[in-house]
Image (cartoon, rainbow, N blue to C red):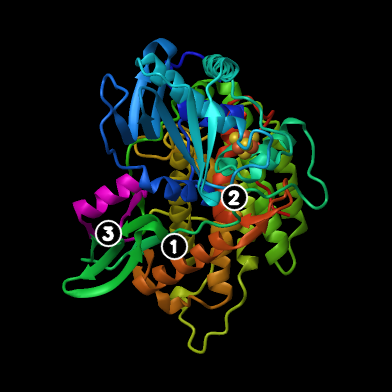
Amino acid sequence: MNNDLDLPDLLPARMVNEYAYCPRLAYIEWVQADFAHSADTLEGRFTHRTTADEEGDLPQEISETDHIHARSLWLSAPDEHLTARMDLLESDGSAVTPVDYKRGAVPDTPERSWEADRVQLAAQAIVLRANGYACSQGVLYYAASKTRVPIPMDDALLARTRALAAELRTVAASGRIPPPLADSPKCVRCSLAPICLPDETNLLAAHATAPDDGIRRILPARDDAIPLYVQEQGARISKSGETFQVRLKDAKLGEARIFETSHVALFGSVQITTQALQEMCARGIPLTLFSTGGWFYGIAHGMTHKNIELRLAQYHVAADPALSLSLASQMIAAKIENSRTLLMRNHPSPPADALAELARLADAARTAPALPTLLGIEGLAARTYFAAFHGMLKPRNDPQPQPDYTFDFNARNRRPPHDPINALLSYAYALLAKDLTIAALAVGFDPFLGFYHQPRYGRPALALDLMEEFRPIIADSVVLAVVNNAILTPADFLRRGPAVALKPTARKKLIQAYERRLDSLVTHTLFGYRISYRRVLEVQFRLLARLLAGEIPAYPAFRTR
Ligand code: SF4
C-alpha cells in the first residue's frame, strides 16, 4: 500500500514468531499496529501472569557460581536489528537459558514444539549472544502440559530465524500486505481474523461468490460489549473499581461493567469524571457527545489508531476525484437499492412507479460520470423514496386522536424536524452516524475525510459516506418499528412552535429499539453467514480498508435482500 513508512530499527522477537505462523499476521501487527484479543490471547496473557513483573538481576558478566532467575527482561541487539522481551532467564553456570511460556500443550510433532515458538526463542538467544552472554539452548514451557521442552540453539535454527526476520523486514518495506492464508485452520485460532477477514478477502479478490452454505464465519457473530447511554440531565458518571457508576446527586441511577462497555454516549448536561475518562482512553472506549435533542457533535477517545498506512491510503483516494466517485457510486447505488427493498418489505402495496424509478436511479448511480450528477441522482431517489414512505406507516386507531401529532409524513425535513416521523428519523440518523464514526476510528480511518461527503468542519464525512447504505435498513427500519408497533405514540412528542421533539422517555425507547436492531442478526448477502448489524458496520470499514490496500477490486457495499 505504502512503502514510504519509516519502520522501526528493531524487530521484536515476537514478530518473528508471528511471521513464521502467518506473514500477514506479522504485517498487520507490526506494520499496521493492529491487534485484537481473542479467548486464546487472553488465555496466553493469563499464562504469562507469573512472568509479567520484572524481577531478578542479570549481571553484565556472569560467572560459574552465579544462579540467575530473572523474570520479564527486555534486551535489544541493534546490530541484529532485534529486540526481545524474555519471560524468564535462567543460568546455572556461565551460560544463560531463555524460557518462553506458551499456553497450550506440548505439540504432537517430532520436535515437540512449533517452529514459530522455536524461532521466537532463537531470536531471544541471538539478542542474548549479541549482549555478550553465552546461550546454547532455550526452553519452551507449555503451560497446559506443564512441560519444559529444551531447544538447542544450533546453527540451522539461528540461520532460519535470521532469514525469517530479514524476510519480514523486506515484506514490511514493500508496503504490500501478504495475502491471507487460503482456507487455513490457523485462521480459526487467529485473534486477528476479524481484522484480517481472510476468507472474505480471498473470495472478493477472486471475484467469486460464496457457496450456498456461505463461507466460514471466523469472526464472532456479535459483540459482547454494549454502549452506555446517559441522558438524565445533571447526571454524573464516575469510575468505581471495575464499573462506571451513574448518579444524579446522591441517587444511583445505574452502573455498567467497564469491560462490557463498548462506548459511552452522553446527551446534554451530563458530567463525567477525569478518572472515568482516563479509564476509557486506556481501554479504547470512546465517548460520544450529543445535544439534548440528539445532535451528534463530538467524540473523545484515546490515542488515534496507529495504522497510519491506512490513513495515508485514505487521503490518497480522497484526493483523487475518479477513485472517490467510484466508491461513492457504489455506496449511493446500495442506499437506493436498500430503500427500494425496505419499501417492498414494508409497504402493503408498494407503488410500482416508485420501485421502477428507484431501480433506474440505482443503475444510474453506479455509472454516474461525476460527483454532482451522483448528488442529483441521490436527491431524486430520496424524494421518490420519501414520497412513498408514509405508505409503510400502519394506520393508527388512537382512541383520542391528536391531530397535531399524528404520524403523517410527506417529506423529509430537519433542523429542526417539523413532525414526529422526521424527529425520529433525525434522531436515529444521529445514532447511526455515531456508531459509524466509532467503527471508522476502530478500524483506523480518519472519520472526517470522506469520498462522497465533502470535508466540512466537525462533519464525520467518511462515517456519513458509509451511513448511506445503512440509513434505510437500520435507521428507517427502527423508526417504522417504533411507530408501527406502537412503541411510541403521538403522546411521546413535544411541539415547540413549528418544531417537534421527542420527550425523554421517547428518546429512551427509540435508543432501545435502535440497539435491538444493531444487535439483531442478519445474513450477510455476500458471505452467507449471519452476524449482527453492529458487526456488519465494522466489516464494511474493514472491507473498505482491504480495497484501499489493493487486495479487493471494488468496494462491496452492503445490500439486503
Ligand atoms: S486470519 Fe489467517 S490469514 Fe489472517 S492473519 Fe490470521 S492466520 Fe493469517
Outermost residue on the left side: it is: 249
Q: Is mark 3 within 8 Å of ligand 1?
A: no
- Secondary structure beneath dot 3 equals loop
State which region is magenta. 270-293
Lower sequence index among marks 2 and 1:
1
Q: Is residue 557 visible?
A: no
**Foreground of the two, 17 or 359:** 17
Q: Which mark is residue 268?
A: 3
Q: Quadrant of residue 388?
A: bottom right
**Foreground of the two, 316 or 396:** 316
In the image, taking residue 440 as reference, residue 366 lies left or right, namely right
Residue that label 2 marks:
536
Lower sequence index among marks 1 and 3:
3
Lower sequence index among marks 2 and 3:
3
Image position, residue 68 (x, y; %): 31, 32
Residue that label 1 marks:
423
Q: Residue at x 43, y 40 (%)?
A: 441
